[in-house]
Amino acid sequence: MLPFARVTMIGLGLIGSSIARGIRAEMPSVEVTGYDAEPQVRERAVEIGLCDDIADSAGAAVIDADLVILCVPVGAMGAAAAEFADDLPADAIVSDVGSCKESVAAALAAALPNATIVPAHPVAGTERSGPDAGFATLFHGRWCILTPADDTPELAVERVAEFWRRLGADVERMEPAHHDRVLAVTSHLPHLIAYTIVGTASDLEEVTESEVIKYSAGGFRDFTRIAASDPTMWRDVFLSNREAVLDMLQRFSEDLSALQRAIRWGKGDELFELFSRTRAIRRSIVEQGQDDAREDFGRTHD
Amino acid sequence: MLPFARVTMIGLGLIGSSIARGIRAEMPSVEVTGYDAEPQVRERAVEIGLCDDIADSAGAAVIDADLVILCVPVGAMGAAAAEFADDLPADAIVSDVGSCKESVAAALAAALPNATIVPAHPVAGTERSGPDAGFATLFHGRWCILTPADDTPELAVERVAEFWRRLGADVERMEPAHHDRVLAVTSHLPHLIAYTIVGTASDLEEVTESEVIKYSAGGFRDFTRIAASDPTMWRDVFLSNREAVLDMLQRFSEDLSALQRAIRWGKGDELFELFSRTRAIRRSIVEQGQDDAREDFGRTHD
């Protein structure tokens, strides 16, 4: 039995359009309605037949939904929810896909004081954006973290969990605050660092930007891929999860200073010890299926 | 006409074994001799038929070579060259594949005062190590940077350039000091940052290592791939290119502090401006063929 019969996506970018495609592939009898604040995105969604129906307003989109998923930048969640608050059916469940959970939970609760809300975060994505970027298998084998409040009905949580399992994800539950600290280190800090180093490299005087691009295969290009992620989404993430990000950044800076010192004083043993330890973590990630084992620096290999 | 008839590789790891395989594929009439200081690596090279001959000593390996390529960590270049100094034919050219050029040029010149030396750096690699990790196409479409001294005979430089072109690389020339600064930013700094962040993530108290691994698909896993690179090689790189690496690290830290400040004070515009700028650099790298255009975060896509 399917957990929902009529699902509405508010926001049709990479994640929203991947969910729409995933429903088509895995739950074809579900009726999918979409809405996006950008008229061009709605037009494009109609063109490519992304959903059964594309609504002209958020209110019209949710009017007969039993699941509404907000797929907009975390800073826009509250306003997007307020837009359809008056039209939301009483028995509908509201969820989202935001990368920060404490701030989003607060924004949704304020905008929809009487709704049943089950916040979710599928830990998956690509460096692309927009309705053409999504694909049905994006969530396969990835984790989706649910962060319901303690008083959320268990049945509602279980229906959202089953929805994500049908899309191919493994589901986990977490306290919102803990989620925000875990993701600060596994996702937000890496993006912040990648954006920074790409900025640093493009601002040098004696090394030109064309040299940076030309010789990027030595490691830099991997950072540029992360730093090509959606600017609006990531601006919102850093502002919304500020405390956890700043705390992780502080620890990172301390560790970087220690490494800087080891290099300055020629302490090869310290460097070697760290570089050996990090290798083991990579092994675990591949063993647990969270990354591909192929050697990806040799991208033209196959 | 082939630039060399008998090529010797000292060091049979990822790069040495890739060169051996590339010669087999692109210049099959060239006789390839290999040597590695590790007896197990020599044994493995014999087992997989990596070279025409595996020598038992560095001296025996170079005895009739017309090109000798040192493929050992940059900190081991001087000692490795000294081992075969007495057996090197007078007309042989010596080259290397080290990631730092000033320190290696000095070490080779000291160990081989009468030899013709053409230092080289193929900007290519993977996160794997050892004689089984190499493959013939590793250098296809990648840059190989030559950093000869001003008094090196032009014919010797051109022969080494032609050798790399035959392996599929594009060849560029650079002053050693400039090379070291360019690579400090496009390769050494990214690796240092990746090693640091993986270390930071594995040292947290309230977020467990297993959580870090589990939710790594949000960005962290990309850093672990870089941080899985060979520890000995990278220890040597940071110690050998110390000044340039420390200088780039200083600039990076300043930029990171500015970003930290923007987050703390909620300056979304500053973040957005940087995040948009970095996207354009990614586009150039893909356009110039230095990276794959496929969205790689969705690794299971195809």
Image (spheres, coloured by chain):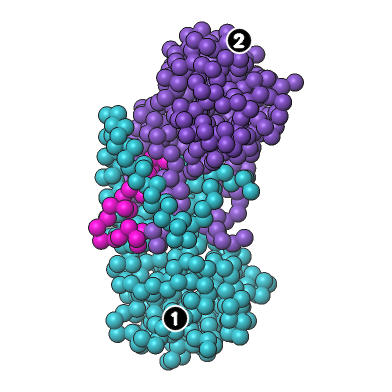
Chain colours: A cyan, B purple
* Mark pair 2, 1: CA separation: 73 Å
Q: Position of residue A17 (x, y in %)?
A: 57, 71
Residue at 37% x, 77% y is A108
Examine the rendered structure and indicate whether residue A6 appears above or below residue B49.
Answer: below
Q: Which residues are magenta?
A: B189-212
Please tell me which residue lies in front, A295 or A253. A295
Q: Which mark is residue B91?
A: 2
Q: Nearer the viewer, residue A228 or B13?
A: B13
Judge left or right: residue A38 versus residue A110. Answer: right
Label 2 vs label 1, nearer the camera = 2
- Most extreme residue toward the left, as rendered? B205
- Asked where in the image residue B153 lies, by quadrant, the reply is top right
Q: Residue at x 31, y 50 (%)?
A: B200
Query: Residue B191: percent from the left, percent from the top?
Result: 42, 41
Q: Residue B88 location, x and y as percent?
A: 54, 12
To the question of a shared chain for discs 2 and 1, the answer is no
Side (left or right) of B161 relative to A19: right
| Residue B150 within the segment the image draws in magenta | no
Q: Secondary structure at mark 2?
A: loop
Q: Indicate whether B200 appears above or below A2.
A: above
Labelled disc at residue A13: none
Residue behind mark 1: A160
Q: Residue furthest bottom?
A: A90
Residue B209 counted in the magenta span:
yes
Q: Report the number of discs.
A: 2
Tell which subunit mark 2 falls on: B
Residue type at the position of mark 1:
Val
Is label 2 in contact with label 1 (beta carbons under 8 Å)?
no
Q: Residues within 10 Å of mark 2 (few under 14, many from 20)?
A: few
Q: Residue at the spot x=35%, y=62% of the render? A: B211
